[in-house]
Image (cartoon, coloured by chain):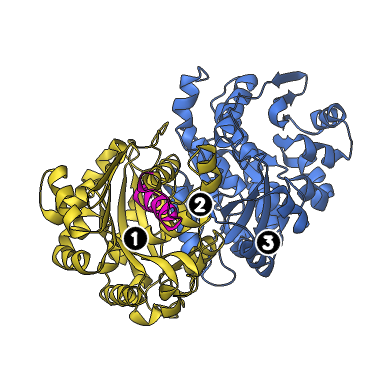
Chain colours: A blue, B yellow
Amino acid sequence: MIQPDFDVLTIGNAIVDVFSRVEESFLARHNVTKGMMRLVSEKESAELFEDMGPSTQISGGSGANTAVGVASFGGKVAFIGKVKADRLGKVFTHDTQSSGVHFATPHAASGPSTASSLILITPDGERTMNTFLGACVHLAPGDIDEAVVASSKVTYLEGYLWDPPLAKEAFKKAARIARAARRLVSITLSDSFCVDRHRDSFLDLIRSDIDILFANEKEIKSLYQVDDFDAAMQRARQDCAIAALTRSEAGCVIVKGGEVHVVEAHPVEQVVDATGAGDLFASGFLYGFTRDLPLAQCARLGALAAAEVISHVGARPQISLNAHAKAAGLL
Amino acid sequence: MIQPDFDVLTIGNAIVDVFSRVEESFLARHNVTKGMMRLVSEKESAELFEDMGPSTQISGGSGANTAVGVASFGGKVAFIGKVKADRLGKVFTHDTQSSGVHFATPHAASGPSTASSLILITPDGERTMNTFLGACVHLAPGDIDEAVVASSKVTYLEGYLWDPPLAKEAFKKAARIARAARRLVSITLSDSFCVDRHRDSFLDLIRSDIDILFANEKEIKSLYQVDDFDAAMQRARQDCAIAALTRSEAGCVIVKGGEVHVVEAHPVEQVVDATGAGDLFASGFLYGFTRDLPLAQCARLGALAAAEVISHVGARPQISLNAHAKAAGLL
């Protein structure tokens, strides 16, 4: 087995986030469920944009955020995702590459524009996402660079990829290549509504192909259709080699067969914008994991990265996570 | 004289800001003078973008920022400026209108894209701007809505408008209409390099048509080509009815003939991004002025607004300046 070129490869929807602060009443008026991600058409996106307040635009996308976080820790990381060759696509590409991520997926020359997500931040710091998938629907099996997958220690896939049909095939292809190359495959469930949409195929996949599962409490309960976190955790323990289950301010639980770690959340002065908390938890965890650090330390690195990203607007770190982790005595 | 519909009308370059954090060495490598605004071609802009780090995009433009600030204080305000009918132009329009500013300048259907400014933020919080004027070169006298100018208590013009030749004519037309309607005309010198480019015509204009001059220390010294602030201030005092001269952390000096006020800067915990400090000072001052508040109080409102805007990335306020000023006992 040759030496892997990348610690982590993430595959996900390539999205530019458009943030706006709103009151709770705005969500009610637009019939949007707080904290969730919903898919919207270009027309719905334009209407919502029209009604919301002034915007701030920052590149995002769950898997891409995780990749940027791994790079910020100092890991070698690649990202596969689809933008169009338009202005927003160039911005996404620049922002991702200049963060130290290898990103070489060909841009779509025609079709819908680069994806954007209107992210509504309520006064409590919670985010509610309204995603127009745009060019993401063109991510296809042909975009999966076999050499990159085969040379990455961990291939990390976002559940959101199950929404655009071709991307789902790309996802499966990547998982097959990774398994054939005896690399690890990881998935995040992304969102409890996303789990609702794809429960059975997620369960099949997790039982057959996944080494490391990331999910938050809502998502893992939704996956197993149980109301109790402990019950969901016991099920995940049977289905996955490793499950990293996050619980916001209640910290996280890591299970690996008989090994269980319950790790605190990293303190945060104020939750300014919760966007990217799960994505960055995965960054820290995977960085530690690919450095062969103990699981509890991986979890602490994840908690540290999540705390940084929720302390400001935008789902990508604003400081060097490597330096931050060293200052905190975690590296 | 009919009752004015607007407290303030601002006219300026309509720009979306693209922020990135850089080290001091980045400025040296690109031969850029810190703290200044320089004009770049679309090609230079693309090259600089390529070399800088991840970006955050927030609508800006000096005069537009001032308008948004006046609206945030609760004033009735309009803005005139030119964007193209492209994605960025729509974002600028949305962000400006949804901040409570009347903005109805027709979008350019063809020609260069909406203006953007690459704003490099150094670790000291200073900003250095690289502006591609794009569609701003199409702002023309025909875009000056006579009814809006004639019904605004103060028409505020940014010196940057002197750069695109047609915009300069638009600027002069607006000043003529305002004077004919017996309204007040105000200008900000914008940037000391901008003053260098247009010194003689700025001086002519100030002596003939300007009621309220805004300038920072560098700009007023450049205008009169003197090294001493006091000397520049004495000259301004002779040339303008009112001059509001800002000196960053040293506060500001307001002169109106024999009336002189020396007002402290508003305390700031940390200068995160200096972009918009001058623009928002003008917002507070003009809001107070159009409410007939004493000049020293106008200056304090300006200082309060400037302090808010430099405490975060982006040149537009993130909170209600009206509520903020009330909490500070200034309204």
**x 42%, y 31%: residue:** B269
Tell me the crowding category of disc 1: few under 14, some 14 to 19, or many 20 or more residues within 10 angstroms, Cα based. Answer: few
Tell me the crowding category of disc 3: few under 14, some 14 to 19, or many 20 or more residues within 10 angstroms, Cα based. Answer: some
Dot 1 falls on a residue whose secondary structure is helix
Furthest residue to the left?
Answer: B226
Quarter of the rendering containing residue B157: bottom left
Location of the N terminus of chain B by quadrant is: bottom left
Quarter of the rendering containing residue A313: top right
**Mark closest to the chain's N terminus, 2 or 1:** 1
**x 60%, y 31%: residue:** A270
Q: CA distance from mark 2 to mark 1?
A: 36 Å
Whether labels 1 and 3 belong to a single chain: the reply is: no
Q: Amino acid at mark 2?
A: Phe
Total residue callouts:
3
**x 65%, y 42%: residue:** A123
Furthest residue to the right?
Answer: A226
Q: Main secondary structure of the magenta part?
A: helix
Q: CA distance from mark 3 to mark 2?
A: 50 Å
Residue of label 3: A166
Coordinates of residue B125 in the picture (x, y in percent): 35, 39
**x 71%, y 58%: residue:** A39
Report if residue A95 is visible in the image: yes
Dot 3 falls on a residue whose secondary structure is helix
Q: Chain of mark 1?
A: B
The stretch in magenta equals B276-296
In the picture, the disc for residue B46 is: 1
